[in-house]
Image (cartoon, rainbow, N blue to C red):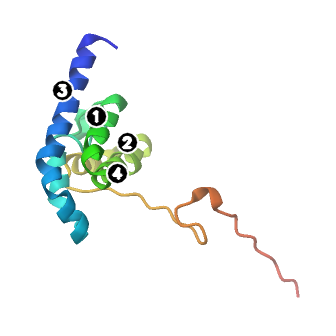
């Protein structure tokens, strides 16, 4: 890793740290105790590029890599694990799946709004008797009745 990359990573770390200290820490207990999902905070994180870390600039994202992504999540999660996990789910489970597997029209439609924080992405997985434990899924056995 070269010096320029280290300097860039340090700036991202400081930015995410300062954001978390300024906008999350003062409210973290209030949000937790009142069970509030701070939608406006996520919109603000979009302005900072935290909601589209891996999204290329042509789709409105920050166009960064996984080192930067991990650094952002780490600094936010140090202050609030719940917010950090929500940012990770948005970036990885929703936005990155569209980036990796969506067609061009889907990317153009969804990625700019997700990267900006205008939309907050999610990902759902559930199966009968397993919830989100994909490893416990069973193939349904159908039996045929012959008359």
| Figure check: 143 above or below 121 | below
Tag shown at residue 99: 2
Tag shown at residue 56: 1
Badge count: 4
Residue 40 is situated, as x and y percent measured from the top left of the image, at: 14, 58
Is 104 left, or right, of 40 in this rendering?
right
| Residue assigned mark 4 | 85
For marks 4 and 3 on the same chain, the one whose residue lies earlier in the sequence: 3
Is 11 left, or right, of 83 in this rendering?
left
How far, Cα to Cα, is label 1 from label 3? 19 Å
Secondary structure category for the residue under label 2: helix
How far, Cα to Cα, is label 4 from label 1? 22 Å
Residue 139: quadrant of the picture = bottom right
Q: Nearer the viewer, mark 3 or mark 2?
A: 3
Secondary structure category for the residue under label 3: helix
| Figure check: 36 above or below 109 | below
How far, Cα to Cα, is label 4 from label 3? 22 Å
For marks 1 and 2 on the same chain, the one whose residue lies earlier in the sequence: 1
Residue 5 is situated, as x and y percent measured from the top left of the image, at: 27, 18
Residue situated in front as seen by the camera: 58 or 23: 23
Residue found 52% across the figure and 62% down from its top: 132
Residue found 30% across the figure and 34% down from its top: 71
Q: Looking at the image, can residue 145 be seen?
A: yes
For marks 1 and 3 on the same chain, the one whose residue lies earlier in the sequence: 3
């Amino acid at each position: 890793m070269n010096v320029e990359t280290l300097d860039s990573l340090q700036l991202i770390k400081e930015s995410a740290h300062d954001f978390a200290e300024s906008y999350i820490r003062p409210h973290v207990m209030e949000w937790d105790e009142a069970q509030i999902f701070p939608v406006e905070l996520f919109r603000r994180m979009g302005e900072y590029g935290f909601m589209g870390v891996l999204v290329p600039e042509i789709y409105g994202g920050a166009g960064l890599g996984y080192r930067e992504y991990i650094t952002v999540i780490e600094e936010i999660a140090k202050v609030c694990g719940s917010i950090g996990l929500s940012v990770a789910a948005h970036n990885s489970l929703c936005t990155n799946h569209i980036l990796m597997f969506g067609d061009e029209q889907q990317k153009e439609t969804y990625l700019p709004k997700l990267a900006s924080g205008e939309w907050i992405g999610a990902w759902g997985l559930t199966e009968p008797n397993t919830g989100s434990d994909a490893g416990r899924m069973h193939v349904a056995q159908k039996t045929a009745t012959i008359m």
